[in-house]
Image (cartoon, helix red, strand yellow):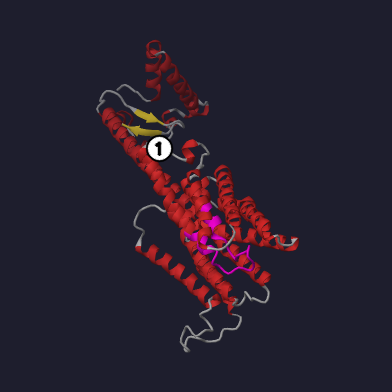
Amino acid sequence: MERARFDKAGIFAFGDARSAVTYSVEVLIVTALYGSLAASAHLLPAINPAATPLWPPTGVALALMLLRGYRVWPAILVGAVAPYLMTDRSLLEFVAAGIGTLLAALAGTWLIGRWSNGRQTFATPSGVAKFASISLAPTAMISSFTALAGFIFVSEPSFPDSVAAGLTWWLADAAATLVIAPVIVLLAMMPLRVSPRWDLLESIAVIALAGLIGIVAYSPLIGSDLISDELNVPLPHRGLLGFLVLLPLIWTSLRGNRCTAATAALIFTGMAVWGFAFGNDPFPKTDPNAALLSLLVLTISVSAPPLALAAAIATRQTTEAHLLSVQDQLNGQLERNALALDSIRRHFQTLIEGVVDYAIFALDREGHVTSWNSTAQKIIGYTSEEIIGKHFGIFYRPDERRAGSPTHALETATDKRQVRRRGLAHQKERDAVLHHRLGLVEP
């Protein structure tokens, strides 16, 4: 199980000067990337000073900590507070948001590592479901309500406004985590090998189609002066066209491509957020709460279910590939065993054919003749084609067969064979008599 361990090595990983420098560079890179994202997130259209339609930093922080462990916590904290230098917002508000994001990432990483196989959580449908549950609570709740505490302390809003802002921010954190964290984790864990050309083209086509559907359904390009009059056709209720995104999402999910499914959902959600910013259908500015709820429901719907389906198909494909591999190994082993058995039979046949003084034949456990040497054919008179497969009771008289002599002889032979293994020196004379009776007939 992949777990981010909360110990000294997991937090700082200082072993020598080289590792310290590596860690410092890693923290600087993560700080710059995360700080840029946190700053851009504040540029998203806000319903009120404390609520944006989606809050990407929470999902990015959780993904980074799943991939790199608890050691990146300083970068996440500094990156979350750094945008304060570029805005006129309260420092306390930024610190609360940064601490909330950090605590949410720590809690989410610990729970996913303990309960849902760490960074491998997207490998199975149950892992996706557990990740979604953890993202809703407690990850998003910790992030949103900690940030809300700072906002309340600074702005002192009314209680109804505080409740509305807290619920809005909670859902925004959860939706952003569901749509962003899987993309980062899955892309980072992709094996470094060249994908088949058709698989790559298929992934590009699915992502492009999802983006195109999002543009047609939600973007402000439709119905504006940014495109030519020939393409600018009226599309009443065009927001309903967003349901068409299920076609590429289901297709890539049935192919078991989790990374493509998550990326296509992210691109489509980005187009929806773009439309939300301009109040396009179905996100009217006249009813911001309903618009935000529609956006969050849309985001959750296109992120978690296709990813769970893709994980189920990928799990089945992996299981089938493993079973085929095991079957190939078993078939190879059976072929080798058959060749070895055939070789033993040939050597045995060569051995008994070299015996010219005795009629030698072998029986199976049911008493059927399985081998017959040429001397047996000369002495007894049956050819191998005539006798192989027949019951050895044919060598007994009818009255002996009616009396059960062949069955008794076969049982005795089985018992004697076991006894002869335990005491060959003492059973030599009796075994010679028994073998003479069953097939070692002297001329």
The answer to whether 186 is drawn above or below residue 52 in the figure is above
Tell me where residue 17 sits by quadrant: top left
The answer to whether 146 is drawn above or below residue 45 in the figure is above
- In front: 53, or 357? 53
- Mark 1, Cα crowd under 10 Å, few <14 / some 14-19 / many 20+, is some
Q: Which residues are the magenta region?
A: 36-61
At 52% across and 87% down in the image, what residue appears?
Answer: 233
- Left or right, residue 281 beside residue 266: right
At 38% across and 21% down in the image, what residue appears?
Answer: 435
The answer to whether 71 is drawn above or below residue 35 in the figure is above
In the structure shown, which secondary structural element does the residue marked by tag 1 occupy?
loop
The furthest residue to the bottom: 229
Q: Picture coordinates of residue 2 (x, y %)?
A: 50, 43
At 51% across and 80% down in the image, what residue appears?
Answer: 221
- According to the picture, the residue beneath numbered tag 1 turns out to be 389
- In front: 345, or 91? 91
Instruction: Report the quarter where the C terminus lies.
Output: top left
Q: Picture coordinates of residue 76 (x, y %)?
A: 51, 51
- Left or right, residue 362 beside residue 73: left
- Left or right, residue 116 beside residue 431: right
Q: Picture coordinates of residue 257 (x, y %)?
A: 46, 59
Q: Picture coordinates of residue 196 (x, y %)?
A: 35, 60
* Kind of residue at badge 1: Gly
